[in-house]
Amino acid sequence: MELRIAMKTSQANGIRDATNDLITSRLSRRTVMKWFAATAAAANLPDPGAGPLAANTPVTTPPATKGYGTDPDVSGYYKPGDFWALTLTATQREIVSSLADILLPGDHLGPAASDLRVTDFVDEWLSAPYPVQQKDRTVILPGLGWIEEESQRRFQKGFNSIGTLQRHAICDDICWPADAAARFKKAAEFFVRFRTLAASAYYSTEAGWKALGYVGNVSMTSFDGPPPEVLAKLGVEQTVK
Amino acid sequence: MPIITTGKSDTEYDIVIVGSGAGGGQMAYTLTLAGLKCVMLEAGRAYNPDVETSMFQRPDQTPLLGVATPDKQMGFTDATIDGGWEVPGEPYTQASTKPEEHFWWWRPRMLGGRTNHWGRISLRNGPYDFKPRSRDGFGFDWPIRYADLDPYYTRVEMLIGVYGSNEGLENTPDSPPGVLLPPPKGRAAELYLQKHAKKLGIPVISIHRAVLTRPLDADSIPAKLHPGNPWAQRIVADSMRRRAACFWATDCHRGCNIRANYQSTTVHLPPALETGNLDIIPNAHAREVTLGKNGKANGVLYMDKTTGREARVKGKVVVLAASSGESVRILLNSKSPQFPRGLANRSGLVGKYIMDSVGASVSGQIPALENLPPHNEDGAGGPHLYIPWWLYREQIGGQFNFARGYHVEFNGSRGMPGGRSPLADDLARGAYGTRFKEEARRYFGSQVGYTCRGEMIPNDNSFAELDPQVKDQWGIPVLRWHWRWSDQELNMVDHATKTFAAMIGAMGGKVRSRQDRSSRDAIEPGGKVIHEVGGALMGADARNSVCNGWNQTWDVTNLFLSDAAPFPSNSDKNPTLTIMALAWRTADYIVEQARKGNL
Ligand SMILES: Cc1cc2nc3c(=O)[nH]c(=O)nc-3n(C[C@H](O)[C@H](O)[C@H](O)COP(=O)(O)OP(=O)(O)OC[C@H]3O[C@@H](n4cnc5c(N)ncnc54)[C@H](O)[C@@H]3O)c2cc1C
Ligand code: SF4
């Protein structure tokens, strides 16, 4: 559904861009060749990390759309795609899902990111017409491209096709900029930004709240303050009687 | 609502009120219940919080998880319409190119103004706050005393409903018994600070906020507010009965569709409209006050934004309550042969002595608050406890290099997450996967933030004037701001940030915000706290003030200012309760003068 919208818009605008090509599930032979060339080149270079991240996945501009304006109906309930079209390709969305699920997996604290529609929120964010989000787009889309290339380079398979351990192997190299090797620095910056974005979405949901231990957003007849076990743990008394 | 359009407004009203926020709302309320016919011009659109408020929407039910954007500058669900730091088509300018000399001006364009989304913190000025110059030699005294405003503070508190406690602290006035609503229980981080701040001699007490922690007593309050006026009592009682008590969920900045907190649109305007004495013209941007040959104001010229044409309303009295900056602008734009420098500006002081609150924040992380058993801390949609200024004696004794106080507001609790990562990057470092989720849970609720709200002393370098060139989309000249903090404020910030670090230390925590900043970097830019006041000071003498102690301009006796423009000082107490108390007092004065035929 979202994909259809995205394709419609990019067709309407006559946009045919390399990123869409590259990450589309039906890879053109020309693109695959370009990839291999890039991977081979990267393997020979001492420090490709110093260059631009995933140089062969140019960042597309989102279709020109307006924002929700200065007087939207704030009493409504919305979902991604309501105010502007989602623009990520199917493959980009798959990488977002896989990566978000590595960051926020299903476990004893709750469901995996993709089950909480984190993919849709990331897509909505990266497709938005506002400056902060557009800047993120210039970091995240090349980053997704990099992840894909890196997976191909290491495992000769796309990120969506490799196993969890292989995904971890890539993530471990880029999960914290200060610890990352020089050639992974740029990818690490992407990773931090992506993690923030995925977590922002994850913890915006009811299941995310549960995972965090947030209790609230329900009407109550009284407010009793922290329960006795909390007061005891802190060694304080309720002073407001 | 009898909200009317321009064509229907050719009657001559008793009073023309410009602006519908705290000042305009209180004016309309008091005047219409006293039987005067009022028309209210509001630059923004009509707004009905009963149906337009975002209440239980989660961040995942809003675009971009609700985060701030250029369209909604305090987030999607915030109750600000067509407003923000910048308003399309309505620029303002800065006299200086230096960012530290810029003034930030927050403006909404909606019925009720900023009262739809304000923080509801409602503190009385204390006795010292009206006579600051007499006390320490800086700034200006008010021509009125605390005792003059005390009864009006009480009335406003009874009408709007304010929770809090009476602590008997210096210059932190108590309300009469039975006036305040019960304060909400302390939250974990608030109580933990309270315990440990004691070691530093810092009191942590219940804050006062305009939120109903129980329903208002509609059977007894109206008679106290409007003695001898059963008609008004009935209308006010009905309005009070339509307000529910807070249900301990949802953020007050979104507004409240059960009317449990104060907004002009839920508390002041409904009973005023019910009287049948109020017409509201929305989308009406006042341009200038018109003057009769007799030297009295006789109406207001405004842009009808629905047609783009200029229109006029006539009245026997004009009250400006467009927010202090806008009221200053209207005065400066109302030029005539009698008042070539702007209306009521013989003193040349219109636009002078603009003040904001001094703001600076320190954040920290408290290990003791980690991994607490999950529990509901939504509470009353804002702070429950705060720190009032506690060092009056030391300060007057000359121990400090700044003359005025600050109070401390807190944030950080187990409030609703969403729209941002709950875990700071550096706390988790490279964590991802289940470890990230565990770390996020561990740290949730252990972040604290302390913010000072301090008193700025008025200075000659902080003022507003008309920009000689720039005009808004209707061709009306705009304000140009001048701003400078003095050492007084910078020294205060230095004290505050060190104190906050000590508080965090006393709780066994670590300061997380940068500590190497100079106070010049730590202080919020002018206007950023959105407590702008001043620009048309009240005083005891027409030569060095714009209005008298009744908010009545010296030069034009039927022109009143009932927002914060007349404030000669800006105590650390947030301004809105004082705006309302002054407006009620001014309205009573107008009614009395009208009865005597003086207006
Ligand atoms: C986020 C936030 C939190 C705040 N928290 C607190 C708090 O906790 N405690 C506190 O005391 N204060 C707080 N304030 C400040 C408080 O909102 C203001 O002090 C108060 O609303 C001022 O009332 P007012 O009537 O002067 O102006 P406003 O409430 O701003 O109302 C002015 C109205 O006049 C209209 N207007 C402007 N120009 C014209 C014109 N030319 N013609 C016609 N109409 C015009 C505007 O559209 C607006 O509706 C806060 C403000 C913000 C933004
Ligand atoms: S916290 Fe209470 S007063 Fe504030 S918006 Fe929610 S219900 Fe209304």
Image (cartoon, coloured by chain):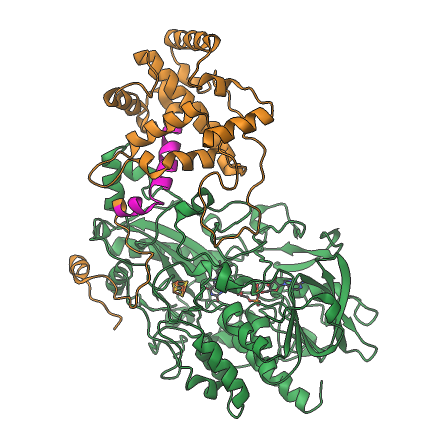
Chain colours: A orange, B green
Instruction: Decide if residue B31 is on the left or right side of residue B543.
Output: left
Location of ligand 2 given as a quarter of the image:
bottom left
Instruction: Decide if residue B211 is on the left or right side of residue A69.
Output: left
Instruction: Label the magenta part by its dominant secondary structure.
Output: helix
Is residue B294 covered in magenta?
Answer: no
**Nearer to us in this view, A128 or A233:** A128
Position of residue B487 relative to residue B36, above or below, is above
Position of residue A196 relative to residue B518, above or below, is above
Stretch of the chain drawn in magenta? A189-210
Instruction: Decide if residue B543 is on the left or right side of residue A231.
Output: right
* Residue at image point 38% right, 59% down: B250
Is residue A197 covered in magenta?
Answer: yes
Residue B393 position within the rendered picture, expressed as x and y whole percent measured from the top left: 38, 72
| Quarter of the view holding residue B386 | bottom left
* Residue at image point 48% right, 38% down: A81
**Nearer to us in this view, A213 or B539:** A213
Image quarter of the N terminus of chain B? bottom right
Residue B451 position within the rendered picture, expressed as x and y whole percent measured from the top left: 40, 57
Residue B351 appears in the rendering: no
How many numbered dots are placed on residues in this image? 0
| Quarter of the view holding residue B139 | bottom right
Residue B324 position within the rendered picture, expressed as x and y whole percent measured from the top left: 61, 65
Residue B315 position within the rendered picture, expressed as x and y whole percent measured from the top left: 73, 77
Image quarter of the C terminus of chain B? bottom right
Instruction: Decide if residue B538 is on the left or right side of residue B383.
Output: right
**Nearer to us in this view, B192 or B312:** B312
Position of residue A51 relative to residue B492, above or below, is above
Residue B10 appears in the rendering: yes
